[in-house]
Amino acid sequence: MPLNGSRANYSNRQRMCGEILGGIDTVHLWLLDPLVIQDTDQWSKTHDPVRGEYFTRNHLNLRLRTSERGTSIQGSLPEYYLGNNAYTLTQNQTQEAFDQLSEDLRINILDAKVNRVDWAVDLVTDYPPYQYDCHLGDSRLLGEKIKFRKTSYYENTSRTLSIYDKGKKVKKDKKSVPEGFNTERWIRIESRIKQPKKHLKMNIVMASDLCSESSRDSLFKGLQMDFKSIHKIKPYQADTPAPRNVHEFYEQSAAELTSITGPDVQINKINNWRKSGDIDSQKATKYRKIIRNLQEQYGTIDPTSLADELSRKLLIPLCLLYTSDAADE
């Protein structure tokens, strides 16, 4: 397994791409064929009344399960191929990882069906990661922002977007750090695609498709689109004049809430109330007008410079993100 050479080439990618790197991380694969088990000591055997007999084991950070029904392979492809998911894989490296896995397991991995794929983007930030999170509100496409263990999640039935301090996690796990990355200034944005065929607009997604430029293009553009849908919160102005009456107090409070969620979320909520019959069309029109007036009066839709920084860095030409495979040669 070419660990050292691949990591050295990662430095070349860093120099070419600047402040951003990205690629495939976790995959869930399914093969219709069972694996040939030679060393039974390395496998755990289980009898299940529904699924029948199956065998499981861990193989270089991948979780394997095989039976007469087929074979499941789940885990981080960079951890398997490079020993560390602080790195992401270029287009060539993804192909190499699948070829290596095919050789290890003596089965053609490129024929595997993809049930899930995670696309990760790493950003070198100008400031510590914790300073950015408070400027990211809810998502127009993925809904409410959810905080869990210092990670921000946005989720619907087909995909999940997560944003977190990758440098802190790498230090905690005592992993090596890619050249050019500072553990104090490192954010990872990760898109978990739970319905790959819907996302990539294909009848079935095979492992071989993840090596293609068009699929990687779709994965990255999907992540860009989801991040763009997040409302960028304008910092609350502490010097806002004291309200002269209860009406102004309510108005300022509503403006602050709208700045956190984003006006689209509030308008969608009003539209849902109208659709369900909770309010009539006259009230819906009045409420939408209030939200728009709040935007104009209090400037609730202006993004901050910190959120702008992340958006700007995500606009890197996609070709640099993986055609820097030329550096691998």
Image (cartoon, rainbow, N blue to C red):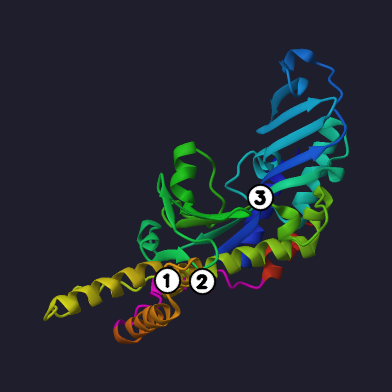
Q: Is residue 209 above or below residue 283?
A: above
Residue 313 is covered by the magenta coloring: yes
Q: Is residue 150 above or below residue 215?
A: above
Q: Could you tell whether 63 is left or right of 136 in the image?
A: right
* Res. 327 in view: no
Residue 183 is covered by the magenta coloring: no
Q: Quadrant of the N terminus?
A: top right
Between label 2 and label 1, give the one nearer the viewer.
1
Name the residue beneath numbered marker 1.
232
- Tell me the kind of residue under disc 1: Lys
Name the residue beneath numbered marker 2.
311
The percent coordinates of residue 57 (x first, y second) are 70, 24
- Tell me the kind of residue under disc 3: Lys
- Tell me the kind of residue under disc 2: Ser
Name the residue beneath numbered marker 3.
194
Between label 2 and label 3, give the one nearer the viewer.
3
> Which residue is pictured at 76% across the width and 24% down the height?
51
Q: Secondary structure at mark 3?
A: loop
Say whether marks 2 and 3 touch (CB < 8 Å).
Answer: no
Marks 3 and 1 sit apart, C-alpha to C-alpha, by 26 Å
> Which residue is pictured at 66% across the width and 63% down the height?
220
Quarter-of-image position of residue 108: top right
